[in-house]
Every structure is written in structure tokens, then in C-alpha cells.
Image (tube, rainbow, N blue to C red):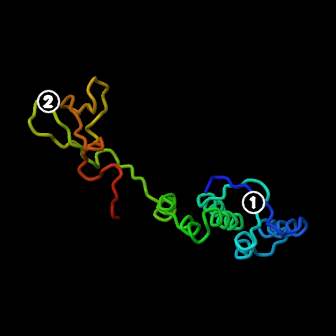
Amino acid sequence: GSEFSEAPPPAPGGSSSQIQKAVCELVELVRPTNSSSTAFQEIGDKVVDENVRLPGSFGASFTGALDAIRSGDWALGAYLAACCYCDNGRESGGAASLSAVDDRCASTLWLEVAQPVVLEVPQGQERLCVRLDHLDDPVWFGTDALRSVVVSKKNAVLVKDVGIGYLLVNKEGDPIAEQFTVGSTLEL
């Protein structure tokens, strides 16, 4: 379906007062004036079975429904999901449109449940692999012996009491470290 859907024209055979009454009932379900609990099934029944829509334009899509639910507006989410179901062909495509994979869920789940920890490794507690011009093999140096230096060559470091060297990097461009790798997962 489209990102925004207009309310459909009144159902044939329905009087204007019947249609207005049905819309008012739907408004009361989606935005109740009293503190009674919302009946999500009733919202779906109004939209799917009775073909009632709220006036105006809404983001009646799977993403729009999920966004409403994520923000805590379950009634609007139920309304948008029912509209999405109808707009995409009901049984033929509506159910499929609501069962799409939402990649944002995996990201949100990871950040909310796993809560990654960012570690700062103290100076000297990690060693980085450095290539020195006067040696054939790279050498491991503690981070407390390395200083950044601005020179024309990339990844240059000043090694204490040795001179300029060049950090060896992996295919992602991160320095090759003895213990920790940028973005890696550690078991604690």
C-alpha cells in the first residue's frame, strides 16, 4: 500500500447518519474519552468488517503501525495495522504485509536487551602490531609506548625510544591488537 491512505468513500447503502455514528464509535475506540481499556479487536472489526475509516490521512503501513506501538499508542497501532491489512488486499496480501520482517526490531532488541558495554583499555594494557622500517618482522608494543604523530604516511606512530613506525591494520582498517579488536565481542 501507499505510505498514506485516504478514508474510503461511504459504503453504498449506508445513510450519512449511520456512517457518522460508525466513525464516532471508531474515534472513541482509538481515542477513548474515558479511562476504560481499549478493545483492539473492536478497532479491527470496525475497519475490516464494517469498512469504517477515520477522516484524514494516516501512515497506514506496517512501519507506521509498529512506530505507533513502539511509542506506546497501541490503539493507533491497531487501527493502522487494520488499515494496512485492508489496503493490501486483506487475506490475499494484507496478512503478508503485516508479517514482513522489520530489521529495526533486531537492532532495537540488541540495544535494549544486550546493552553492549564499551570498554576503554588503560594505557599499556594492550599491545599493537607495528612495522618498523629497519626491521623485517613487525613488533608488538604496549599502547603506553605509542604516540600518534602527524606525518605524510597513514597509521604512523611514534614509538618511545625507537622512532616512527606504522600500525598494521586489518581489512576494516582497525589496528591489529593482541587482545582486543574494535567492534569485537568479549565473553566476561
Q: Nearer the viewer, residue 69 or 35?
A: 69
Q: Amino acid at mark 2?
A: Asp
- Where does residue 34 sit, x and y in percent of width and height? 85, 71
Q: Secondary structure at mark 1?
A: loop
Quadrant in which the C terminus is drawn = bottom left
Q: Residues within 10 Å of mark 1 (few under 14, many from 20)?
A: few
Return the residue at label 1.
8
Q: Nearer the viewer, residue 58 or 18?
A: 18
Q: Residue furthest top?
A: 152
Q: In which quadrant of the rendered view does residue 91 lie?
A: bottom right
Total of numbered circles in the picture?
A: 2
Q: Amino acid at mark 1?
A: Pro
Q: Residue at x 59, y 58 (%)?
A: 63
Q: In which quadrant of the rendered view does residue 171 lie?
A: top left
Q: Determine whether label 2 and label 1 are within 8 Å by CB.
A: no
Return the residue at label 2.
133
Tell which tag, 2 or 1, sits nearer the viewer.
Answer: 1
Q: Residue at x 62, y 59 (%)?
A: 61
**Is 129 drawn above or below residue 115 in the view shown?**
above
Of callouts 2 and 1, which one flags the residue occurring earlier in the amino acid sequence? 1
Describe residue 76's horizontal placement relative to residue 120 as left or right: right
Quadrant in which the N terminus is drawn = bottom right
